[in-house]
Image (cartoon, rainbow, N blue to C red):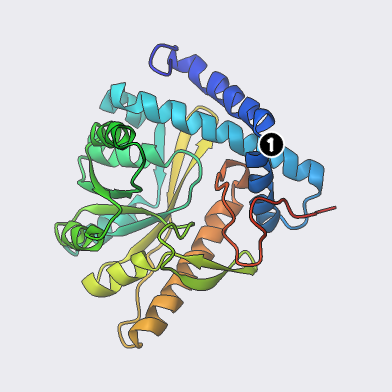
Amino acid sequence: MANAIPFRLLVPLSTGVGQLLAKLRPVLADGLRANLARVRPQANQAELQALAQDSFGSYGRYWAESFRLPTLTPEKIDDGFEVIGYEHLVRARESGLGPIMVIPHLGGWEWAAAWLGRVAETPVSAVVEQLEPEDVFDWFKRLREALNVNIIPLGPDTFGHLLRAVKDNHVVCLLADRDIGGTGTNVEFFGHQASLPVGPALLARRTGSVILPTAVYFRGNKRVCQIDPPITVDSDLPLRQALRQTTQEVSNALERLIGQAPGQWHVLQPIWQDQPPGTAESNQ
Protein backbone atom coordinates (compact mmCIF):
# COMPACT_ATOMS: atom_id res chain seq x y z
CA MET A 1 0.00 0.00 0.00
CA ALA A 2 2.83 2.42 0.86
CA ASN A 3 4.27 1.96 -2.61
CA ALA A 4 0.93 2.18 -4.40
CA ILE A 5 -0.32 5.40 -2.79
CA PRO A 6 0.82 8.65 -4.47
CA PHE A 7 3.58 10.13 -2.34
CA ARG A 8 1.71 13.42 -1.79
CA LEU A 9 -1.08 11.42 -0.09
CA LEU A 10 1.19 9.15 1.92
CA VAL A 11 1.83 11.59 4.78
CA PRO A 12 -1.80 12.38 5.70
CA LEU A 13 -2.98 8.79 5.23
CA SER A 14 -0.18 7.14 7.23
CA THR A 15 -0.49 9.76 9.98
CA GLY A 16 -4.22 9.06 10.21
CA VAL A 17 -3.66 5.29 10.39
CA GLY A 18 -1.15 5.77 13.20
CA GLN A 19 -3.56 7.92 15.18
CA LEU A 20 -6.32 5.36 14.64
CA LEU A 21 -4.05 2.66 16.06
CA ALA A 22 -3.66 4.71 19.25
CA LYS A 23 -7.44 4.55 19.73
CA LEU A 24 -7.69 0.85 18.88
CA ARG A 25 -4.78 -0.18 21.14
CA PRO A 26 -5.22 1.82 24.36
CA VAL A 27 -2.60 -0.25 26.23
CA LEU A 28 0.08 0.95 23.80
CA ALA A 29 -1.18 4.51 24.15
CA ASP A 30 -1.00 4.21 27.96
CA GLY A 31 2.66 3.19 27.80
CA LEU A 32 3.50 6.05 25.48
CA ARG A 33 1.68 8.61 27.66
CA ALA A 34 3.62 7.37 30.69
CA ASN A 35 6.88 8.08 28.88
CA LEU A 36 5.70 11.43 27.55
CA ALA A 37 4.73 12.42 31.10
CA ARG A 38 8.43 12.29 31.95
CA VAL A 39 9.34 14.42 28.95
CA ARG A 40 6.58 16.99 29.67
CA PRO A 41 6.00 16.77 33.46
CA GLN A 42 3.98 20.00 33.41
CA ALA A 43 1.45 18.61 30.88
CA ASN A 44 -2.07 17.66 31.99
CA GLN A 45 -3.89 14.52 30.80
CA ALA A 46 -5.48 16.24 27.80
CA GLU A 47 -2.12 17.56 26.66
CA LEU A 48 -0.48 14.16 27.11
CA GLN A 49 -3.28 12.56 25.09
CA ALA A 50 -2.71 15.05 22.28
CA LEU A 51 1.04 14.39 22.35
CA ALA A 52 0.43 10.64 22.23
CA GLN A 53 -1.89 11.07 19.23
CA ASP A 54 0.78 13.12 17.47
CA SER A 55 3.40 10.51 18.28
CA PHE A 56 1.34 7.61 16.91
CA GLY A 57 0.69 9.68 13.79
CA SER A 58 4.42 10.30 13.44
CA TYR A 59 5.10 6.58 13.94
CA GLY A 60 2.64 5.69 11.18
CA ARG A 61 4.35 8.16 8.87
CA TYR A 62 7.76 6.73 9.80
CA TRP A 63 6.79 3.22 8.73
CA ALA A 64 5.04 4.26 5.53
CA GLU A 65 7.97 6.42 4.44
CA SER A 66 10.48 3.72 5.39
CA PHE A 67 8.64 1.24 3.16
CA ARG A 68 8.69 3.79 0.34
CA LEU A 69 12.31 4.95 0.64
CA PRO A 70 13.94 2.14 -1.40
CA THR A 71 11.81 3.11 -4.42
CA LEU A 72 12.81 6.79 -4.36
CA THR A 73 15.61 8.15 -6.52
CA PRO A 74 18.60 9.82 -4.84
CA GLU A 75 17.30 13.13 -6.22
CA LYS A 76 13.90 12.61 -4.58
CA ILE A 77 15.51 11.65 -1.27
CA ASP A 78 17.74 14.73 -1.38
CA ASP A 79 14.82 16.99 -2.26
CA GLY A 80 12.89 15.90 0.84
CA PHE A 81 15.79 16.13 3.28
CA GLU A 82 17.73 18.90 5.02
CA VAL A 83 20.82 18.52 7.24
CA ILE A 84 21.89 20.91 10.00
CA GLY A 85 25.35 20.38 11.47
CA TYR A 86 26.68 18.20 8.63
CA GLU A 87 30.12 19.75 9.17
CA HIS A 88 30.44 17.74 12.42
CA LEU A 89 30.12 14.48 10.48
CA VAL A 90 32.53 15.60 7.75
CA ARG A 91 35.14 16.70 10.29
CA ALA A 92 34.84 13.43 12.20
CA ARG A 93 35.36 11.31 9.07
CA GLU A 94 38.40 13.36 8.09
CA SER A 95 40.14 11.79 11.09
CA GLY A 96 39.91 8.41 9.36
CA LEU A 97 37.50 6.99 11.95
CA GLY A 98 33.78 6.73 11.42
CA PRO A 99 31.62 8.78 13.83
CA ILE A 100 29.06 7.12 16.09
CA MET A 101 25.63 8.68 15.61
CA VAL A 102 23.38 8.19 18.65
CA ILE A 103 19.74 8.54 17.66
CA PRO A 104 16.44 8.53 19.57
CA HIS A 105 13.33 6.68 18.36
CA LEU A 106 11.97 9.90 16.93
CA GLY A 107 10.70 11.19 13.60
CA GLY A 108 12.14 9.58 10.48
CA TRP A 109 15.68 8.42 11.21
CA GLU A 110 15.66 6.05 8.19
CA TRP A 111 15.87 9.17 5.99
CA ALA A 112 19.30 9.97 7.45
CA ALA A 113 20.60 6.51 6.55
CA ALA A 114 19.06 6.72 3.07
CA TRP A 115 20.48 10.20 2.46
CA LEU A 116 23.96 9.24 3.65
CA GLY A 117 24.01 5.96 1.74
CA ARG A 118 22.38 6.99 -1.55
CA VAL A 119 22.92 10.76 -1.83
CA ALA A 120 26.14 11.53 0.07
CA GLU A 121 27.52 8.07 -0.93
CA THR A 122 28.90 7.63 2.59
CA PRO A 123 29.25 4.11 4.00
CA VAL A 124 26.74 3.52 6.80
CA SER A 125 26.47 0.67 9.31
CA ALA A 126 23.52 0.22 11.65
CA VAL A 127 22.65 -2.27 14.38
CA VAL A 128 19.19 -3.82 14.23
CA GLU A 129 17.39 -5.96 16.78
CA GLN A 130 16.76 -9.59 15.85
CA LEU A 131 13.07 -10.18 15.09
CA GLU A 132 10.96 -13.30 15.12
CA PRO A 133 10.07 -15.04 12.89
CA GLU A 134 13.32 -15.05 10.96
CA ASP A 135 11.73 -14.26 7.60
CA VAL A 136 10.37 -10.99 9.05
CA PHE A 137 13.89 -10.05 10.17
CA ASP A 138 15.26 -10.94 6.72
CA TRP A 139 12.62 -8.74 5.09
CA PHE A 140 13.56 -5.74 7.27
CA LYS A 141 17.24 -6.42 6.63
CA ARG A 142 16.69 -6.35 2.85
CA LEU A 143 14.64 -3.16 3.18
CA ARG A 144 17.49 -1.33 4.91
CA GLU A 145 20.20 -2.81 2.71
CA ALA A 146 18.32 -1.32 -0.25
CA LEU A 147 19.21 2.06 1.27
CA ASN A 148 22.94 1.16 1.02
CA VAL A 149 23.13 0.47 4.76
CA ASN A 150 25.36 -2.30 6.13
CA ILE A 151 23.16 -4.14 8.65
CA ILE A 152 24.72 -5.59 11.82
CA PRO A 153 22.32 -7.92 13.73
CA LEU A 154 22.25 -7.49 17.50
CA GLY A 155 24.07 -10.48 18.99
CA PRO A 156 27.32 -11.78 20.52
CA ASP A 157 29.46 -10.60 17.58
CA THR A 158 27.92 -7.13 17.29
CA PHE A 159 30.69 -5.18 19.00
CA GLY A 160 33.43 -6.72 16.87
CA HIS A 161 31.55 -5.76 13.70
CA LEU A 162 31.09 -2.23 15.03
CA LEU A 163 34.81 -1.88 15.77
CA ARG A 164 35.56 -2.84 12.18
CA ALA A 165 32.92 -0.43 10.83
CA VAL A 166 34.38 2.53 12.75
CA LYS A 167 37.91 1.69 11.63
CA ASP A 168 36.65 1.43 8.02
CA ASN A 169 35.30 4.99 8.38
CA HIS A 170 31.63 4.01 8.27
CA VAL A 171 29.07 6.25 9.90
CA VAL A 172 27.70 4.00 12.65
CA CYS A 173 24.05 4.58 13.59
CA LEU A 174 22.93 3.43 17.05
CA LEU A 175 19.48 3.93 18.58
CA ALA A 176 20.39 4.96 22.11
CA ASP A 177 17.25 5.83 24.12
CA ARG A 178 16.40 2.23 25.12
CA ASP A 179 18.59 -0.37 26.80
CA ILE A 180 17.38 -3.33 24.72
CA GLY A 181 20.15 -5.69 25.81
CA GLY A 182 19.81 -4.88 29.51
CA THR A 183 23.55 -4.24 29.87
CA GLY A 184 23.50 -0.44 30.10
CA THR A 185 24.46 1.95 32.85
CA ASN A 186 22.20 4.02 35.10
CA VAL A 187 22.01 7.71 34.27
CA GLU A 188 19.61 10.57 34.82
CA PHE A 189 17.17 10.89 31.92
CA PHE A 190 14.51 13.58 32.12
CA GLY A 191 15.06 13.86 35.85
CA HIS A 192 14.72 10.16 36.69
CA GLN A 193 17.07 7.18 36.75
CA ALA A 194 17.08 5.05 33.61
CA SER A 195 19.40 2.46 32.12
CA LEU A 196 20.75 3.59 28.75
CA PRO A 197 23.06 1.56 26.49
CA VAL A 198 26.76 1.89 27.20
CA GLY A 199 27.75 0.63 23.73
CA PRO A 200 28.27 4.05 22.08
CA ALA A 201 30.60 5.19 24.88
CA LEU A 202 32.54 1.90 24.87
CA LEU A 203 32.90 1.97 21.09
CA ALA A 204 34.18 5.55 21.20
CA ARG A 205 36.62 4.70 24.01
CA ARG A 206 38.02 1.67 22.19
CA THR A 207 38.42 3.39 18.82
CA GLY A 208 39.08 7.04 19.66
CA SER A 209 36.11 8.10 17.56
CA VAL A 210 33.50 10.69 18.52
CA ILE A 211 29.79 10.44 19.31
CA LEU A 212 27.38 12.63 17.33
CA PRO A 213 23.90 13.07 18.89
CA THR A 214 21.48 13.15 15.95
CA ALA A 215 17.73 13.33 15.33
CA VAL A 216 15.57 13.50 12.21
CA TYR A 217 12.38 15.55 12.55
CA PHE A 218 9.29 15.63 10.35
CA ARG A 219 8.58 19.26 9.45
CA GLY A 220 5.66 19.51 7.06
CA ASN A 221 6.55 17.54 3.95
CA LYS A 222 10.28 17.76 4.74
CA ARG A 223 12.59 15.83 7.07
CA VAL A 224 15.22 17.84 8.93
CA CYS A 225 18.29 16.11 10.35
CA GLN A 226 20.01 17.82 13.26
CA ILE A 227 23.58 16.72 14.06
CA ASP A 228 24.86 18.14 17.34
CA PRO A 229 28.53 18.83 18.21
CA PRO A 230 30.62 15.77 19.08
CA ILE A 231 30.89 14.09 22.46
CA THR A 232 34.30 12.63 23.29
CA VAL A 233 35.28 10.08 25.91
CA ASP A 234 37.79 11.10 28.56
CA SER A 235 40.58 8.58 28.01
CA ASP A 236 42.29 9.52 31.29
CA LEU A 237 39.41 8.33 33.48
CA PRO A 238 39.03 4.72 34.65
CA LEU A 239 36.94 2.78 32.14
CA ARG A 240 33.75 2.42 34.18
CA GLN A 241 33.75 6.06 35.24
CA ALA A 242 34.43 7.23 31.68
CA LEU A 243 31.59 5.12 30.27
CA ARG A 244 29.08 6.37 32.81
CA GLN A 245 30.14 10.00 32.36
CA THR A 246 29.90 9.76 28.57
CA THR A 247 26.56 7.95 28.68
CA GLN A 248 25.22 10.74 30.90
CA GLU A 249 26.37 13.25 28.28
CA VAL A 250 24.55 11.19 25.64
CA SER A 251 21.45 11.18 27.85
CA ASN A 252 21.59 14.97 28.17
CA ALA A 253 21.89 15.33 24.39
CA LEU A 254 18.97 12.96 23.78
CA GLU A 255 16.87 15.01 26.22
CA ARG A 256 17.50 18.12 24.15
CA LEU A 257 16.73 16.38 20.86
CA ILE A 258 13.54 14.68 22.10
CA GLY A 259 12.43 17.83 23.91
CA GLN A 260 12.30 19.73 20.61
CA ALA A 261 9.53 17.45 19.30
CA PRO A 262 8.13 15.10 21.97
CA GLY A 263 5.10 14.46 19.76
CA GLN A 264 7.42 12.61 17.37
CA TRP A 265 9.03 10.35 19.99
CA HIS A 266 7.67 6.81 19.97
CA VAL A 267 9.10 4.62 22.74
CA LEU A 268 6.17 2.59 24.05
CA GLN A 269 7.99 0.43 26.64
CA PRO A 270 8.80 1.62 30.20
CA ILE A 271 12.41 2.80 30.37
CA TRP A 272 12.69 4.34 33.87
CA GLN A 273 13.47 2.27 36.93
CA ASP A 274 10.66 3.72 39.06
CA GLN A 275 8.04 3.46 36.32
CA PRO A 276 5.39 0.71 36.65
CA PRO A 277 5.19 -1.48 33.51
CA GLY A 278 2.52 -0.32 31.07
CA THR A 279 0.91 2.27 33.30
CA ALA A 280 0.41 5.96 32.61
CA GLU A 281 1.49 8.36 35.31
CA SER A 282 -1.03 10.75 36.74
CA ASN A 283 -0.52 14.30 35.55
CA GLN A 284 -3.20 16.84 36.36
Question: At 65% from the left edge and 50% from the top edge, which residue is drawn?
Answer: 278
Secondary structure at badge 1 equals helix
In the image, 218 versus 155, the foreground residue is 155
Locate residue 49 relative to residue 59 in the image: left or right.
right
Label 1, residues with CA under 10 Å away: few <14, some 14-19, many ≥20 = few
Count of numbered circles on the image: 1
Question: Is 235 situated above or below 264?
Answer: below
Residue 268 placement (x, y as % from top left): 58, 46
Question: Is 101 situated above or below 115?
Answer: below
Read off the residue under disc 1.
Answer: 26
* Quadrant showing the N terminus: top left
Residue 141 placement: quadrant:
top left
Question: At 40% from the left edge and 60% from the top edge, which residue is drawn?
Answer: 181
In the image, 215 versus 125, the foreground residue is 125
Locate residue 253 relative to residue 144 in the image: left or right.
right
Residue 23 placement (x, y as % from top left): 69, 30
Residue 267 placement (x, y as % from top left): 55, 48
Residue 275 placement: quadrant:
bottom right
Locate residue 97 relative to residue 193 in the image: left or right.
left
Residue extending farthest to the right is 284
Residue 185 placement (x, y as % from top left): 46, 72
In the image, 233 versus 227, the foreground residue is 233
Question: Is 13 situated above or below 104?
Answer: above
Three-letter amino acid code at the position of disc 1: Pro
Locate residue 165 relative to residue 37 in the image: left or right.
left
Question: At 24% from the left edge and 31% from the top edge, which residue is drawn?
Answer: 146
Residue extending farthest to the front is 133
